[in-house]
Image (cartoon, helix red, strand yellow):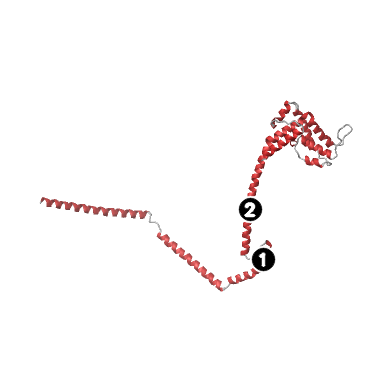
Amino acid sequence: PAGALLQERGCAAYSRGRQAGMEVVDIPFDRTTEWLLERRIVGASYTKSLRTVHARLAAALAAERPAEAPAVAQLVPPGTERASLTYFDAKAVMQALLDAGLGEKTLFGGYSNAHTAQWADIVRRFEAGSIHLADAASAMAQAVGYELPALKKEAARAEKELSELVRRQGEYERLAAAAEERYVAACDKKGLGTDCSREEIGRRLRESRSLLRATFARVAALCQSEEMGGAVEYYLAYVRHCLEAAARLGADVGAKAAPPDVTADGADRAGKAAKAKGKAKGAKGGEGAGGGAAAGGGTADRRAA
């Protein structure tokens, strides 16, 4: 859409230029200065004259703005940088001074007002040698090549941030509505009714303070009664019984889970018991072997007979 709009405006400007009898220059925008130099519309040393004009323009910006022409302060407010101004801005300031009635001339044709004379000199130096065309071409190339892409990126970033802010706003509105519903439900639960404002809650709290003294007195009397004393004694006895039972249970469990005797004496006793058990097994084995041999001999005697 933006490209179509620019194309439409370009065609309209082309038509107006043709109707006014103007020459339409159809060249790349970044080669406008070269085109001007090739056709000698501007001199080869135009940069030197342009530096002089820029210096006078900086001096004019440093001067105070005339009180008789408030439009000048709007066109070039204090703090305006020289690099942001072109020949067309100087022409606009000159026209504002003339519209404010500061265009009186002296006998020699100059302007009597110092501000008007200063800006008139800047405009005249811009137009001398057509260096204002080269300055405008340079400003156009700078704007199209660098400033416009930067502005597009900034606009895209701003649109992205705006969409994120709109999303957050919707989320916060939903959270606020949910919080309000919970607040109203809590007020209904407390019996505050429809009037659940901060002032109403504060008024009810102040009224309830007068009831707290009687409530505290009744609680203190109950704590000092004989029934409360008996209940406290019973609770102390119950806690004491639970602690003693837990101590006994811990002692029994510790005794059952005690580790075996691993001292030096215990090791000696265990070794002796193992040796005695081994000797008993050896004796049984010998007796079994002797009996077997005797039985074998009897069998041999019987066969011989």
The percent position of residue 247, horizontal first and vertical second, equals 46, 63
The percent position of residue 178, horizontal first and vertical second, equals 62, 57
Where on the picture, by quarter, is residue 102? top right
Write down the residue under mark 1.
Answer: 204
Where on the picture, by quarter, is residue 201? bottom right
Task: Give me the C-alpha separation between circle 1 and circle 2.
Answer: 31 Å
> Within 10 Å of the Cα at label 1, are there few (<14), some (14-19), or many (20+) other Cα atoms?
few
The percent position of residue 93, horizontal first and vertical second, equals 80, 38
Which is more toward the observer, 264 or 16? 16
The percent position of residue 271, horizontal first and vertical second, equals 33, 53
Write down the residue under mark 2.
Answer: 172
> Residue at coordinates 19% horizontally, 52% vertically from top-left?
292
> Residue at coordinates 63% horizontally, 50% vertically from top-left?
168
Q: Is residue 186 left or right of residue 88?
A: left
**Which quadrant: the N terminus?**
top right
Can residue 150 be seen here? The reply is no
